Amino acid sequence: MVVLCASSAINYIEDIRNAGYEPVILEPSIPGVPPAEVRKELEAEYAHIKGERPAIYAASPNYGETLEMVRTIAPCCIIPGTDFGLELATTLTHDLGLPGNNPERLPYMREKDKMQEAVKAAGLRSIRGKVVTTVEEGIAYFREELKGKSAIVKPLRSAGSRGVVACLTEEELCNAIADDIDMVRKEKAPFIGVLVQERIVGTEYFVNTVTMGGQTVVTNVVRYDKMKLSAERPVYVSAVSLQPDDALCQMLMDYVVKVVNATGLEIGPTHTEVMVDEDGPVLIEVNARLAGACQPAEWQDQVLGLHESDIALRAYLGKDIHTDSYNNYKAIDSADGQYAYFLRKRPGYFHVGVNLHDFEAEEFIGKELIESLSSTFSYHGFEAPRFYEATKDFFTAPGLVYLVNDSAEQLQRDHEMLLEVEMNHMDKLFKMK
């Protein structure tokens, strides 16, 4: 059973079938979001399922009723598909005695302040910050503790960099805190505060892992490349998969595996974001689910030699996570024996689309242009007709292009060509209204 099956978690469906099991999907109740909007978003995700759509069940707002329904279905394992399915999946596995994580550790896998507390308690480098419930509290912390240095404001629970704002001045800080408070309350989510953190300036990476029975394997190490579209909102423009056998990647993997252990995660995948500056790596956030960005399993196979949903599913099914189910691709033990990692197979990016201005798209006309690039494997998004707002996070990117090429230089050229088109010639991708 996959709880809230969306984005890269769609890949679980084919893996479950290939493993000899029958997939089912559980759709959680999402408070504060109109049912028609939820239905539209989920149907768009399900369109990417290969083969027959699995049985889909709707969770009740009453947890007890949901528990009894799932007990009747009798799944052998329950997997969170996205951040928003994590709590329900974790609670159900605990109450049904299935392989899963301790619900008491959920805050350390979901809430950005608790994650920092966990890594600090484990003796790892962390980012100082404070949860505030008012603009006034945020200003006081900015003045007294951060001494007016630049800060990051973010919701305690979010994904895709939504609501994350870099603030250089008190005015920017005030606006960011007020906007994040307003965003959470509009969504009718439990308001437990906004996190104000010291801003760490460096290069951002993410490290994906899978854990089972005290063992952890690293499936991918990636560098994010960003561009500043405005002073407070640098946006992601690409994610570059790295070969994990150099000194930097070894340092990142060692730190991240210790972070995963600090959260108390016992089973399943993590997607951990880390900033590296002159003092080394420090945690941004850890997410107890697959990396998102709707990554196709076939593209990951080309780049990584495996796809991450397969390794994660193997963990839930109690299989060896040091090898994949398709290519007999095997992990390598780290020098200290504390974890293992898979070598990257080929250079690969995913290019994150950007647009500088709001626009109304009547038609997507960029198919031939995107497919003409020698590195293009596939692409996602670029829908029309629809309204696009200026890019400020993953959710407002107009689309994603998955690139793979034996030549890292050609990959970079193709990425730069796409970026140049988006920055200066968006009319080559869309017919504007």
Image (tube, helix red, strand yellow):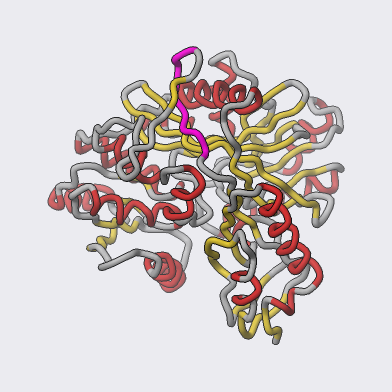
Of residue 365 and residue 113, the one placed in the foreground of this image is 365
- Is residue 256 left or right of 200 when viewed as pictured? left
Of residue 61 and residue 314, the one placed in the foreground of this image is 314
The secondary structure that most of the magenta stretch takes on is loop
Residue 396 visible to an observer of this rendering: yes
- Is residue 270 left or right of 273 when viewed as pictured? left
Look at the image and tell me in which quarter the C terminus lies: bottom right
- Is residue 204 left or right of 290 when viewed as pictured? right
Which range is magenta? 336-344
Residue 275, above or below 416: above
Q: Residue at x 46, y 33 (%)?
A: 342
Badge count: 0
Residue 184 position, x and y percent, is 58, 52
Quadrant in the picture for residue 246: top right
Quadrant in the picture for residue 134: top right
Residue 228 position, x and y percent, is 80, 52
Residue 216 position, x and y percent, is 41, 26
Q: Residue at x 46, y 71 (%)?
A: 37
Of residue 83 and residue 291, the one placed in the foreground of this image is 291
Q: Is residue 343 magenta?
A: yes
Residue 302 position, x and y percent, is 48, 50
Residue 110 visible to an observer of this rendering: no
